[in-house]
Amino acid sequence: EAGVAQSPRYKIIEKRQSVAFWCNPISGHATLYWYQQILGQGPKLLIQFQNNGVVDDSQLPKDRFSAERLKGVDSTLKIQPAKLEDSAVYLCASRGSADTQYFGPGTRLTVL
Amino acid sequence: AQSVSQHNHHVILSEAASLELGCNYSYGGTVNLFWYVQYPGQHLQLLLKYFSGDPLVKGIKGFEAEFIKSKFSFNLRKPSVQWSDTAEYFCAAGAGGTSYGKLTFGQGTILTVHP
């Protein structure tokens, strides 16, 4: 079974630039999550989708972050404009019928 | 508010030593508990999980964890660690029942095992 795919794996940008991350979940998984993991901390949920609908985006900084999952499969997370404090690893996870999340390798973002 | 606290930021052991990593949670209602591991250069992987039933759960690679409801704890144990157990370990909690599985993570514990 293929795992959760993410790209790019690394990204370096200047502050105030925009960036986008892509995630393809495990086939058939209806629930998709985006987490932010700042160095030295555990992952923090940014947004959760059930199929193509948003379930929870309470911790998403909506003035600069946006995410979509238009066809209920893959998803993109965008930051515009980026700030220094957005430097982190962005993790995508998916979940099927069981209550277990499977994580992708993450995208490491460095904002200079 | 839900929270998960891991007691140790960095644990250093020699091979064959016993391991116990502490995890406490604050959650209203039924809770599902998880331990994830992240080996160097790899992604987060599930070690074990507790949903209900026997409070002593066994996971992969000889790890086990005990759910103690009265102490709001879910400590991870291994009787004899190996060099290959060097990794970062995360405890996580999610609401049980029919939730969509949102997880709250602890801050992680880095385990270094010396050969």
Image (spheres, helix red, strand yellow):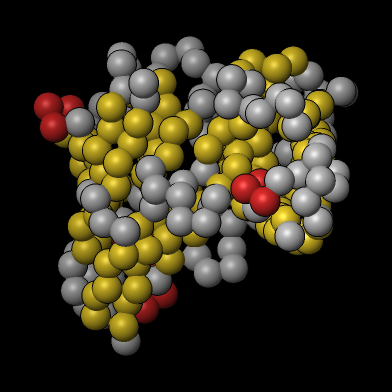
- In this rendering, is residue A49 above or below A110? above
Residue B93 image-quadrant placement: top left
Q: Is residue B91 left or right of residue A89?
A: left
Identify the residue shown where x is 74% and y is 15%: A53
Q: Residue furthest left?
A: B70
Residue A28 x, y percent position in the rendering: 74, 30
Label count reads 0
Q: Is residue B53 left or right of residue A2?
A: left
Q: Quadrant of the N terminus of chain B?
A: top left
Q: Which residue sits at x=59%, y=68%?
A: B41
On screen, residue B113 above or below A23: below
Is A88 drawn above or below residue B115 in the view shown? Answer: above
Across and down, in percent, residue A104 comes to: 66, 49
Q: Locate the C terminus of chain B and report the quarter of the image it occupies.
A: bottom left
Q: Is residue A85 visible?
A: yes
Horizontal and vertical percent for residue A55?
64, 16
Q: Residue at x 55, y 50 (%)?
A: A38
Q: Quadrant of residue B24?
A: top left
Is residue A22 visible in this depiction of the protein? Answer: no
Q: What's the residue at 20%, 57% (across, down)?
A: B20
Q: Position of residue A77 (x, y in %)?
A: 77, 36
